[in-house]
Image: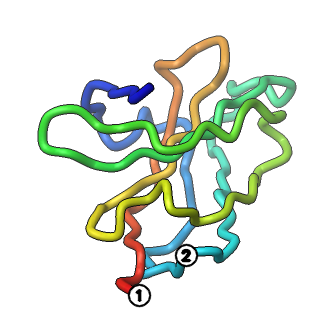
Amino acid sequence: MVIFAAKREPNSGKIHVTSPGPGPWVNGSIQAATWRSDDPELPQDKSVIVETYQSLPDNDKLILSLGQVKYTAAQKQFEITNDYPKNGVFYVLVSVADDLSTFGTSSYFTIAQN
């Protein structure tokens, strides 16, 4: 099943996704999504959903859902697999699980052409 998500603004301003960097990353490499917040009102006991998306012109395609982790974990590792098309542009989305309007996105990253 392919899941598409509507385009979003780059950031709600509450969560800052600081990695992964731009790459290009090679198939089989382990990357880390990391995040932080400057918002003192963001409860530290919240869970966040971590996902990777392919950026497309109209709607973005969900590539990998990394599940929920506590916000305070501040990182989640993932592997670059064949699920990432080689000619794509991707990003990580971190959203508060019970308030999807609170989110942050990483900068775009690419996959090496092997």
Residue 94 appears left or right of 12: right
* Residue 64, above or below 19: above
Residue 19 visible somewhere in the drawing:
no
Which residue was labeled with disc 1? Answer: 114
In this view, the residue in front, 14 or 24, is 24
**Residue at the left extreme of this rendering:** 57
* Residue 71, above or below 91: above
Instruction: Answer whether labels 1 and 2 touch (C-beta < 8 Å).
Output: yes
Residue 59 percent coordinates (x, y): 22, 32
Find numbered disc 2 in the image and state the secondary structure of the residue it sits on.
Answer: loop
Label 1 to label 2, Cα distance in Å? Answer: 8 Å
Amino acid type, label 2? Asn
Quarter of the rendering occupied by the N terminus: top left
In this view, the residue in front, 18 or 32, is 32
Residue 23 percent coordinates (x, y): 45, 80
In this view, the residue in front, 40 or 3, is 3
Instruction: Name the quadrant containing residue 24.
Output: bottom left
Amino acid type, label 1? Asn
- Label 1 crowding class (10 Å Cα cut-off): few <14, some 14-19, many 20+? few
Which residue was labeled with disc 2? Answer: 27
Find numbered disc 1 in the image and state the secondary structure of the residue it sits on.
Answer: loop
Residue 30 visible somewhere in the drawing:
yes
Q: Residue at x 36, y 61 (%)?
A: 85
- Label 2 crowding class (10 Å Cα cut-off): few <14, some 14-19, many 20+? some
Quarter of the rendering occupied by the C terminus: bottom left
Q: Residue at x 77, y 36 (%)?
A: 71
Closer to the N terminus: mark 1 or mark 2?
2
Residue 19 percent coordinates (x, y): 57, 65
Q: Residue at x 40, y 68 (%)?
A: 109
* Residue 40, above or below 81: above
* Residue 100, above or below 36: above
